[in-house]
């Protein structure tokens, strides 16, 4: 309204808070009108969607569909209504349009929108570069043991369990933003579980396979290599859900393998599923079960498209404009390279996950689920646990992450970081960016926790490092070689599984 009022009065158009229209070309004449009308209509459509009455799921779907339509219809997305693209077309004498068409054809061949210059990165060369060796592998996982960077190391190791829907190297992008390198520098002997990018012949694998052959086997190997009965474990996103379930399986078996557990942006209670909950209902899950529930794959490309459209302006339309309308080459960005390096999932595992977590939310019910032959009860895990959520996370909303405090027993610490699902977690301490909140008590309400929490500048990593230092054991001389007499090095880190591409 302010923009339209300025236009009607002849006053200068104020700067738009929408970065799509922040350039000078959008502040004058018909393009300013187009941007102003679009923003007015977008606000009207969103308020109209919010006013719809009905059940929560239906309202969320209407809001999501409306937002998708609103984002798609931005005048910035079309050459005829984008003054910046038109200006570039004139300045380059048509070269930008020709290059844009080449970019479009290339992406059509790849089957996805290019978000970064993929030729600028190579796994093991300039991403996933922490030194180490693969010391174990089976049909589903490799285990990497990272080389020490300190003269002494803590006797109790740290095993990291990344999400199986992405490659592990989000935790080891480059040295300056690697959580792996940070933990190694704190004197931890770090092990990484690297999931295999499953192909058609592994389309029969189940949730239990990911628990038993994946997480539990990884813990078993790390215990044997380190000679420690109890180890520290960390899970990220669905890796945290798998880790929490595996820990409950071990508890049901009477096995005490875990000294401490860290869960980063993890759902154990799926009552607040965020934007992903829009897609999941009985019909959708039943369809998945009927098509791939007994064998088959969910292809990485499909998962990548879904996640991109959760943030369409940032991860879809931004690149339509820059790549195709302006003919620009995508910049080199390690995080977006990782984001485009998709993974496949086996149909039975995926279908079980959808039904029993997102749809029926049964993991929170003690004894309701049988995994690996035993009833799982998260409350029986009973180990010190560090819980982290990101305040702007659209995949695991922090209120949902906070719900884990009601399910787990033992000493718990909840910390909230700024930013989103990835940028909040991968926030190097050395950069001094963003902030985080720490609350010493854990009330029932997440909002009550935040109201009493203390705001701290910078990364949450040092707080986690201080917390973890209580569970590390005595110092020992750093090992000269990875593995042991039984588990010998197979190949250098980052291993071969992480380099396998999705079909």
Image (cartoon, rainbow, N blue to C red):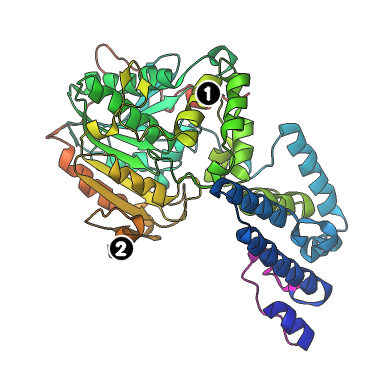
Q: Please indicate whether residue 208 sits to the left or right of residue 12 in the image.
A: left
Of 310 and 20, the residue lying toward us: 310
Q: Position of residue 498 (x, y in %)?
A: 49, 27
Circle 2 is placed at which residue position?
Answer: 456
Q: Please indicate whether residue 40 sits to the left or right of residue 481 in the image.
A: right
Residue at the spot 82% in from the left edge and 77% down from the top edge: 29
Name the quarter where the N terminus is drawn. Answer: bottom right
Q: Can residue 172 be seen in this view?
A: no
Q: How far apart are the alpha carbons under marks 1 and 2?
A: 39 Å
- Our reading of the magenta stretch's main secondary structure is loop
Q: Position of residue 65 (x, y in %)?
A: 67, 49
The quadrant where residue 363 appears: top left
Residue 197 image label: 1
Bounds of the magenta segment? 11-26
Q: Where is residue 376 in the image (x, y as percent from the top left)?
A: 31, 26
Of 205 and 457, the residue lying toward us: 205
Q: How many labels does the image show?
A: 2
Q: How crowded is mark 1: few (under 14 residues within 10 Å), some or many (20 or more)?
A: many
Q: Which residue lies furthest to the front in this view?
A: 54
Name the quarter where the C terminus is drawn. Answer: top right
Residue at the spot 27% in from the left edge and 19% down from the top edge: 220
Of 87 and 247, the residue lying toward us: 247
């Amino acid at each position: 309204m302010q923009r339209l009022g300025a236009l009607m009065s002849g006053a200068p158009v104020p700067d738009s808070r929408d970065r799509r229209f922040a350039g000078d070309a959008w502040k004058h004449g018909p393009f300013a009108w187009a941007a102003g009308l679009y923003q007015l209509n977008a606000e009207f459509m969103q308020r109209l969607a919010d006013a719809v009455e009905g059940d929560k799921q239906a309202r969320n779907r209407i809001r999501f569909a409306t937002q998708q339509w609103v984002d798609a219809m931005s005048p910035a997305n079309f050459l005829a209504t984008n003054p910046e693209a038109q200006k570039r077309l004139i300045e380059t004498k048509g070269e930008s349009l020709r290059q844009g068409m080449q970019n479009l054809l290339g992406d059509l061949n790849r089957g996805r929108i290019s978000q970064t210059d993929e030729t600028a990165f190579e796994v093991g060369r300039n991403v996933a570069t922490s030194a180490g060796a693969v010391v174990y592998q089976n049909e589903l996982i490799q285990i990497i043991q990272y080389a020490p960077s300190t003269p002494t190391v803590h006797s109790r190791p740290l095993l990291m369990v990344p999400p199986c829907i992405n490659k592990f190297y989000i935790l080891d992008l480059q040295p300056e933003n690697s959580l792996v390198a940070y933990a190694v520098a704190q004197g931890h002997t770090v092990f990484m579980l690297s999931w295999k990018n499953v192909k058609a012949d592994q389309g029969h694998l189940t949730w239990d396979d990911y628990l038993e052959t994946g997480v539990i086997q990884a813990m078993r190997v790390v215990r044997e290599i380190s000679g420690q009965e109890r180890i520290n474990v960390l899970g990220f996103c669905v890796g945290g859900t798998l880790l929490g379930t595996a820990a409950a399986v071990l508890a049901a078996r009477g096995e005490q393998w875990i000294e401490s557990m860290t869960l980063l942006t993890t759902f154990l209670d799926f009552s607040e599923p965020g934007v992903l909950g829009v897609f999941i209902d009985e019909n959708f899950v039943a369809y998945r079960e009927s098509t791939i529930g007994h064998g088959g794959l969910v292809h990485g490309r499909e998962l990548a498209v879904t996640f991109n459209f959760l943030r369409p302006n940032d991860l879809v339309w931004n690149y339509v404009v820059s790549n195709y309308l302006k003919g620009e080459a995508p910049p080199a960005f390690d995080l977006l390279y990782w984001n485009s390096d998709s993974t496949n999932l086996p149909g039975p595992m995926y279908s079980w996950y959808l039904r029993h977590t997102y749809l029926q939310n049964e993991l929170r019910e003690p004894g309701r689920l049988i995994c690996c032959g035993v009833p799982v009860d998260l409350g029986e895990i009973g180990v010190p646990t560090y819980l982290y959520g990101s305040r702007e996370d659209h995949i695991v909303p922090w209120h949902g992450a906070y719900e884990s405090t009601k399910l787990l027993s033992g000493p718990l610490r909840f910390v909230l970081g700024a930013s989103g699902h990835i940028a909040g977690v991968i926030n190097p301490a050395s950069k001094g960016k963003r902030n985080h909140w720490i609350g010493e008590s854990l009330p029932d309400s997440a909002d009550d926790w935040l109201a009493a929490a203390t705001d701290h500048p910078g990364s949450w990593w040092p707080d986690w490092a201080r917390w973890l230092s209580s569970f590390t054991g005595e110092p020992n001389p750093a090992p000269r070689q990875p593995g042991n007499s039984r588990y010998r090095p197979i190949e250098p880190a980052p291993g071969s599984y992480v380099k396998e591409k999705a079909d």
